[in-house]
Image (cartoon, rainbow, N blue to C red):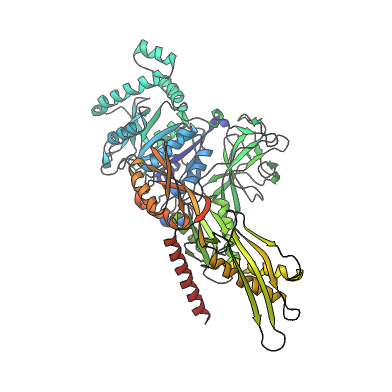
Amino acid sequence: MKSYATDALRNIALAGHNDTGKTTLVSGLLFAAGAVNRFLRVEDGNTVTDFDEEEVQRKISIQLGLAHAEWKGHKINFFDTPGFAMFISETLAGLKGADSLAIVVNGVAGVEVHTSKIFSLGEQQRIPTCIVINKMDKDYADDEKVVAQLKDKFGNRILPIQVPIGKESGFHGVVDLVRRKAFLSAGDGTPGAKEAEIPADMKARADAAFEQLVEKVAEGDEKLMEKFFETGTLSPQDMLAGLKKGIAKRDIIPVLFTSAAKLTGLPSLLDFVVDLMPSPAVRPWEGKNPVSGEALSFEPKEDAPPSAYVIKTISDLFAGRITIFKVLSGTFHSDGTYYNSTRETPERFGAINAIQGKTLTPVGEAKPGDIVALAKLKETKTFDTICEKGKPILYDPLKIPEASISFAIEPKSKGDEDKISSALARLMEEDPVLKLTRDMQTKEIVLSGAGQLHIEIVVKKLQHKYGVGVNLKLPKVPFKETVTRKAETTYRHKKQTGGRGQFAEASIILEPAGRGEGYEFIDEIFGGSIPQNFRPSVDKGIQATSVKGVLAGYPVVDFKVRLVDGKFHPVDSSDRAFQIAGSMGFKEAFAKAGPTILEPIFNMEIASPEEFCGDIMGDLNGRRGRVQGMDVEGDLRVVKAQAPLAEILTYSSDLRSMTQGRATFSLEFSHYEEVPKFAQEKIIAAAKKEKAGETEEEE
């Protein structure tokens, strides 16, 4: 396959709410452009961009899919993004690599939650955007209603550049307002389009839509405005030039109409992408010098220093790690040696490939703007920068949402721990949201992800792809115990069973330390009431008991123990005896020192449409949460709060139910604080019940 000059490249991300037909649309566009020889369907599980086993079975996109087609001498790289909010990191990666955005909207459902989210992301990134109203062949599809919704939501930048011909099942073509022609569906199961005159019964509507469009195009350019005033119209060439300028500045958000399932409107959409969406040549990236940190950029030209950014990693059982990157400057060649400036290490390239779903085709070299793939890079990971060592540059890694839900995992079969760790390591290479940690306190392996469905999909992949099964359960809350006041005690350990006995006596003072200060043992004995060699044994006994806890089996933290006195026996005293004295003495003093339980408190940010904020704040109050304020971000309200981890373990699914899936949230650990007494009683009772169960199992 040949490589393409930068001006002949187009990179477009298709994004939007789930069930708008994005994957079907990409499939139809590939067929229309001749990149595949038949129309591949989601229902048949054979589309180019949904190739993962879980995607095929669930019939939804889970990860970013990439494909390409040639159209009129141009190469179009398509980024097929998931429509579920929990996979937003994949969409963000697609937007990062694309130079334009097509927001796909359901012609029946109209503007939905994720439509607004994607529009907002496009606004933040200033990415040229169009809107494709798909599924125009479905019952109750209504172009005028949906366009009105779009204008109401996003303003008068929303401008149809087409008018659909026919309604619902009768939809069979579009009127191109720029060229003033109709393009009718071939009607024979192929995606071809027949050019025709505008139907007589549609001429009045097309003329009215053209008038709105031409006025908006003329507004954006003084010369075009003069022509418009002189002639009252603009030529198709002037319209294309003005539209291209308005789209690049986001002054115009054009609207097009398709039925991907019926292969209608697809050649016109391909024409639009080639004629009016920007090439990578006009969207250079800003980076920095990795040594000095100073701002740095390279022109997207073939003779510039080479640089590239890793958009995605795919972990393939047979091909190994497949690294997908966008060339930002210079020319990359197969079998060359380049430099990973993120990890400060060289990387030896093998063959550079074009990527079509999961199929790689060698291309030999890659020019600025192109999307290519390499197999078996050793060190490079997602969001890394590749460049030339002598002319380094570093691009900032993409910021993606943190994991919002966690589950403890345990192998279904004993001895599978290593296999699970290895499999998850490979899954985390292709999914940066996934996090795997081991809680040192609870001894649990904790898997965190973007939502319950996300974690369930990972578990299925572990089973089907790597042959290991795991059980999921909510993770234990890492409570801690501490004391609130000073207490002292003297404990004597004395045991005589014939022969050498056991004797040790220790007087200790237990008192609270500052939050986060941990544990301190202070030896305040003067003289020889306890010999020097036995004093560390008292400390050892205290530490052993504090790790296991006293109230409910959780570690004791933030306390000081002063060893002030004691007694010993020259024959019966021993290291073991003083450990027991320290342990039992600590338990006695702990009971007198106002023992309490601490719990982890997390900062929360919940982004939601305004109508759900009252329910969200009321729910947080019921979870012992504290609302600390609310910010406005576009159409959303961001509720900021703090809440105990114990009350928000299931918050992901609860919030989804509460807000019809229209809200998202993030968590960040803040601090530990005391659990209310009523809740402590429940924690202690649960701990006793669990301990009794463990004892029964041992018996």
Q: Nearer the viewer, residue 461 or 543?
A: 543
* Number of callouts: 0
Residue 281 placement, left or right of 251 = right
At a point 47% along the width and 27% down the height, the residue shown is 248
At a point 55% along the width and 68% down the height, the residue shown is 550
Q: Nearer the viewer, residue 283 or 233?
A: 283
Up the image or down, 207 lies above or below 656; here it is: above
Q: Position of residue 9 (x, y in %)?
A: 53, 33
- Viewer can see residue 691: yes
Q: Nearer the viewer, residue 168 or 661?
A: 661
- Viewer can see residue 317: no
> Dividing the picture into quarters, in which one does residue 392 lie?
top right
Q: Position of residue 37 (x, y in %)?
A: 45, 46
Work out which residue is located at the far top of the displayed protein and give it: 230
Residue 461 placement, left or right of 576 = left
Q: Nearer the viewer, residue 380 or 584?
A: 584
**On the rendered image, what quadrant is the N terminus found in?**
top right
Q: Position of residue 488 (x, y in %)?
A: 60, 66
Q: Position of residue 413 (x, y in %)?
A: 54, 71
Up the image or down, 432 lies above or below 438; here it is: above
At a point 45% along the width and 25% down the height, the residue shown is 244
Up the image or down, 537 lies above or below 170; here it is: below
At a point 48% along the width and 61% down the height, the residue shown is 460
